[in-house]
């Protein structure tokens, strides 16, 4: 980070008015956004191309990415009428044994300050604002104490399968001291997925100062000012001496492909509290995870960013619910773009739903205001969907869900045109 080493951020940080002026049009667009597609379009306008594509992409040909969204289109909602419901509905539930006001939350994701200088604090503020769960990644660019100061509600700490057990013990202790209620072990990241948009863009953290990256930075002045006028970011939860531009090297040195069920059992013993296994798509793995001691099954394919042609999570959810029984908590993420998607996931067996890209679009578009707006959009859509279905509470939706959702044969007309965003449809006309 040559400009940061020269102290440029200390000079630019003393003229905050420039950043406010550059961000003003995006703040207006975020305020006027009506759906997640709008926030995606704003994020694409504001962010460096390399950063937006890192957020937006999937693995290989992005087949799983498209299928994850398309799978919801194949599910019809067979609603009841004359249910006598009075808005607003009760969207409260429990996650990891904690009371929350919403049955969905922003998933833990790495390196949030890459998208906006507020980074993880923006998502923490949004979780506090909406009274829902907050998830912090072990590759976060904001420290555990800072998050604890902002978010007093329930929190889950996400951990990768690190080689260094002393590192694991240290970060678990920090999470306990920081008031985190649960641990989520990510198990689908033992190899780094093939994200071809990143390769084409020459993705680095931060951007290399090549002519191409400089040109893209000039085209994204609000993002570039944001980046240059604020301190360089690092992996605040693990080792503040590891700069963010060492991501690939750090991950390659620490990720442990040999991590197995015995290692998971050791980890659970070290944690000693509510725990989720994140990355399950098979019923037999879910059963084994339950036997190993995980209290929560987190159905996820890592946002379709790892193994290409991995299944859509909503498609495997019912089989996992059947395998682990009615009393085991299940979280689902993947492909969610609408409140109706959340309603379908709850109806088919999920106790809570994590969203990744939707809130990161909001973050890249407008910091904390953008994340609050993203969760608010989904809250309103879920409230409306439940009302129209005839279910007044989350428990009611879960109990009656299997009779409300039916699969239909696929039709090309069901799916949004994958290139519609680029042509200006489905978002961005604000």
Image: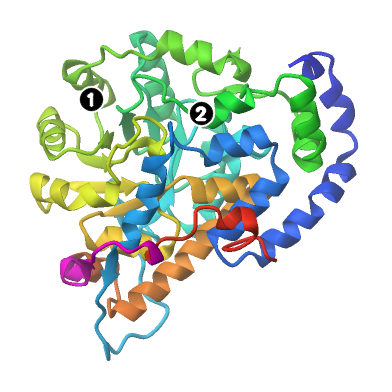
Residue 340 position in % (x across, y down): 38, 66
Residue 427 position in % (x across, y down): 60, 61
Left or right relative to 180: residue 78: left
Give the quarter of the figure containing the C terminus: bottom right
Q: Does residue 392 appear anywhere in the picture?
A: yes
Left or right relative to 220: residue 325: left
Q: How is the image coloured?
A: rainbow
Looking at this view, is 374 or 14 the one in front?
A: 374
Left or right relative to 145: residue 316: left
Query: Looking at the image, do the residues carrying marks 1 and 2 touch, with CB atoms under 8 Å apart?
Result: no
Badge count: 2
Which circle, 1 or 2, is nearer the viewer?
2
- The image quarter containing residue 99 is bottom left
**SS at mark 2 in the image:** helix
- The residue under the point 55% across, 31% down is 197
* Crowd tier of the residue under label 2, counting other residues whose Cα lies within 10 Å: few below 14, some 14–19, many 20 or above: some
Mark on residue 268? 1
Left or right relative to 212: residue 383: left
**SS at mark 1 in the image:** helix
On whether residue 409 falls in the magenta region, the answer is yes
- The image quarter containing residue 77 is bottom left
Magenta segment: 399-413
Q: Does residue 277 appear anywhere in the picture?
A: no
Looking at this view, is 400 or 417 the one in front?
A: 417
Q: Report how far apart the C-alphas of labels 1 and 2 lie in the structure.
A: 35 Å
- The residue under the point 55% across, 64% down is 35
Q: Compared to 144, does 28 lie above or below?
A: below
Give the quarter of the figure containing the N terminus: top right
- The image quarter containing residue 204 is top right
- The residue under the point 29% across, 61% down is 410
Mark on residue 196? 2
């Amino acid at each position: 980070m040559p400009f940061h080493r020269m102290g440029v951020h200390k000079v630019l940080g003393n003229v905050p008015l420039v950043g406010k002026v550059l961000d003003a049009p995006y703040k207006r667009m975020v305020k006027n956004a009506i759906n997640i597609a709008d926030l995606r379009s704003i994020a694409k306008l504001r962010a460096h191309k390399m950063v937006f594509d890192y957020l937006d992409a999937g693995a290989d040909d992005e087949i799983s990415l498209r299928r994850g969204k398309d799978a919801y289109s194949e599910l019809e909602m067979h609603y009841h009428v004359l249910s006598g419901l009075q808005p607003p509905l009760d969207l409260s539930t429990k996650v990891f044994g904690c009371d929350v006001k919403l049955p969905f939350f922003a998933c833990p994701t790495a390196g949030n300050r890459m998208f906006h200088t507020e980074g993880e604090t923006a998502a923490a503020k949004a979780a506090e604002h909406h009274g829902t769960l907050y998830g912090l990644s072990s590759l976060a660019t904001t420290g555990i104490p800072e998050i604890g100061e902002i978010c007093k509600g329930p929190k889950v700490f996400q951990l990768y399968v690190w080689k260094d057990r002393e590192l694991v013990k240290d970060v678990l202790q920090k999470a306990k001291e920081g008031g985190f209620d649960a641990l989520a072990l990510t198990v689908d990241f033992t190899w780094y997925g093939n994200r071809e948009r990143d390769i084409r863009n020459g993705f680095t953290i931060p951007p290399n100062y090549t002519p191409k990256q400089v040109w893209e930075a000039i085209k994204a002045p609000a993002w570039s000012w944001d980046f240059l006028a604020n301190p360089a970011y690092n992996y605040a939860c693990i080792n503040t001496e590891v700069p963010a531009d060492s991501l690939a090297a750090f991950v390659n040195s620490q990720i442990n492909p040999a991590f197995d069920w015995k290692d998971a059992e050791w980890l659970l013993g070290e944690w000693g509290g509510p725990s989720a296994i994140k990355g399950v798509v098979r019923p037999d793995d879910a059963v084994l995870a339950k036997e190993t001691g995980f209290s929560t099954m987190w159905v996820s394919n890592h946002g379709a960013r790892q193994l290409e042609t991995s299944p859509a999570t909503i498609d495997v959810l019912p089989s996992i619910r059947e395998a682990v029984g009615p009393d085991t908590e299940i979280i689902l993420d993947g492909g969610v773009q609408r409140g109706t998607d959340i309603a379908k996931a709850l109806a088919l067996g999920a106790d809570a739903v994590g969203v990744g890209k939707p809130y990161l679009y909001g973050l890249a578009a407008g910091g904390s205001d953008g994340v609050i707006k993203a969760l608010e959009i989904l809250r309103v859509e879920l409230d409306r969907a439940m009302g129209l279905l005839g279910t007044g509470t989350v428990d009611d939706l879960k109990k009656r869900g299997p009779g409300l959702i039916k699969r239909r044969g696929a039709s090309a007309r069901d799916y949004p045109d994958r290139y519609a965003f680029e042509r200006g449809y489905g978002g961005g006309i604000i």
